[in-house]
Image (cartoon, rainbow, N blue to C red):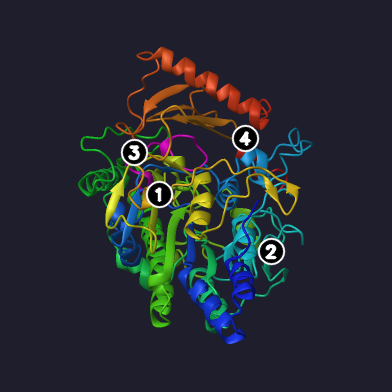
Amino acid sequence: MSRKPIYLAIALLATHAGLTKPALAQATETANQDRPNIVLILADDLGFTDISPFGSEISTPNIAELARSGISFTNYHTAGSCAPARAMLLTGVDSHRNGVPNIPEALPVEQQSQENYQGVLNDKVITLATLLRDEGYHTYMTGKWHLGHTPELLPSARGFERTIAMADTGADNWDQRPYLPIYDQANWYADGERHTLPDDFYSSEYFVDKTIEFISENSSDQTPFFAYLPFQAVHMPVQAPREFSDKYAGVYDEGWAVMREKRHQAAEAAGVVPENTDAVVTPGTLEWDSLSEEQKRHHARRMEVYAGMVDAMDMHIGRLMTYLKDIGEFDNTIFVFTSDNGAEGSNLILPNGGSMLANWFDQVGYDANYETLGERNSFNAIGASNATIAASPLAYYKFYASEGGLRVPLVISGPGISRRNEMTDEFVFVTDLAPTIMSLASVENHSGNWKGKDIEEIIGKDFSSFLTNDDEAIHSASNPIGYELGGNRALFKGDYKIVFNRSALGDQNWHLFNIKTDPGEANDLALEDPDRLAEMLTDYEEYVETNKVLPMPEGYSQRREVFRGALN
């Protein structure tokens, strides 16, 4: 059962102690000031080494400042796609129990009859925002939601006091327009109502502007806030102001093989991965030297824009940090920075700049021309081969259950975090963040009951004591953690992981890796350690049964499901 808010407890004590109203107000204000603000920043499709503390050539000084003042997790895992990751992040509940085992756009019709396969947050889970709001926090959200867009499913109905929400998989970063032909319009909402974006809109700038606006509206009441800031950066369409993209002119001209190795070496030097980490080339990656000069030029520019979009996001995060410093709240704010999944590898833009969406581009006014790539009316995506840079030295990328799809950066800093300027390879899973944030905010776990209603229990592990040096380990080596999305499967246990990819590049076999010593998944231990493989396969089957994981229909393709009927 959830504890009563601190201010109510103070009121009860005040009654017995005979405190005057001014004294009670002072006591309440003091208690509120002792509780930390929380800023949860979620990048979209950001790869494992896309920030400078993790070995990137991209300038991210503000995220680096947070890393220096806190702790960076190099063995943090999330889901391979956006909506399941967001649902687990905000509830601490497995995606097959919170209603979001896949993005709704990709759910096959054969699964949609099942209650736990709707692709939107069900009514059996309570969000982190609701729990914090119950405890007296202001709760704000600005950015991509993608967990439902009917009135009862929007963030304004799931615990957030003020909201700017993009309800779809994504949208244009410059205009109010859809980015794929599966949508008739870009579905934006403000506080639960349809919203029209301003003419000078750029997503990263606007999200931070609105976050600052929401915080400032209540800055005088001494009440702590929870701000959830899920950026569109760097989800496609990859777009950035030209001054940011041009900062990286020429950086990617040597191609992805060279840049992968540079990232790999930088990650080792920074302590992000072990020395002499083996790496494999993700199947399907093109040979750079097989491309024409025009194709190389176009691919390099795509990455320049991508880097510019990350750089711009970091700059706007810096504006929020500066604002909090200016109002005296920065030192009392916990920052959590991470990504929803690994880098996006879809080949919607072809090597020559053309696209499978060319006819739709012509209809709506998009193009992928080199001269204006990433600017207004331009559609950009980095593609599979460039995605191997973002994931380096890991294998694969978004959607896949390999490390490049699931392992992303996690940085935590602020009050309550004693570890400073540290990196750790301690395993953490996305469901662990909600209970940890709750603990840091002195909010008790609901234990499956909220206001007398039975709800799904939080399965994540509260690792707040690890942040204060009190615990040496977060998860027991005997504790299995299962995962499935679109038929791609994994199970983690101690330092080990079994993985099965059924997607286009997968070989349809289970593999076993020690991901602490071999994060590149280069050395399959399945034949060498068959007993461990068998044990973990049994654990996975128990996970499937416990969480009602459905098999995928024969011939299922996520891309085909998403675009069903849209390209006719």
According to the picture, the residue beneath numbered tag 1 turns out to be 465
> Looking at the image, is mark 3 or mark 2 earlier in the sequence?
2
> Looking at the image, is mark 2 or mark 4 earlier in the sequence?
2
Foreground of the two, 518 or 57: 518
Tell me if residue 233 comes above or below residue 527 in the rendering: below
Q: Are marks 2 and 1 in contact (CB under 8 Å)?
A: no
Amino acid found under the numbered disc labelled 1: Ser
Residue 412 seen in render:
yes
Q: CA distance from mark 2 to mark 1?
A: 40 Å
Tell me if residue 555 comes above or below residue 117 in the rendering: above
Question: Mark 3: few, some, or many residues within 10 Å (few <14, many ≥20)?
Answer: few
Q: CA distance from mark 2 to mark 4?
A: 25 Å
Provide residue 24's location: percent of width, then percent of height. Answer: 58, 80
545 within the magenta span = no
Question: Mark 4: few, some, or many residues within 10 Å (few <14, many ≥20)?
Answer: some
Q: What is the count of numbered marks? A: 4
According to the picture, the residue beneath numbered tag 4 turns out to be 557
Mark on residue 39? none
Provide residue 267's location: percent of width, then percent of height. Answer: 26, 46
The residue tagged with tag 1: helix, strand or loop? helix
Amino acid found under the numbered disc labelled 4: Ser
Q: CA distance from mark 1 to mark 4?
A: 42 Å
Amino acid found under the numbered disc labelled 2: Asn
According to the picture, the residue beneath numbered tag 3 turns out to be 287
| Quadrant in the picture for residue 116 | top right
According to the picture, the residue beneath numbered tag 2 turns out to be 187
Provide residue 260's location: percent of width, then percent of height. Answer: 29, 44
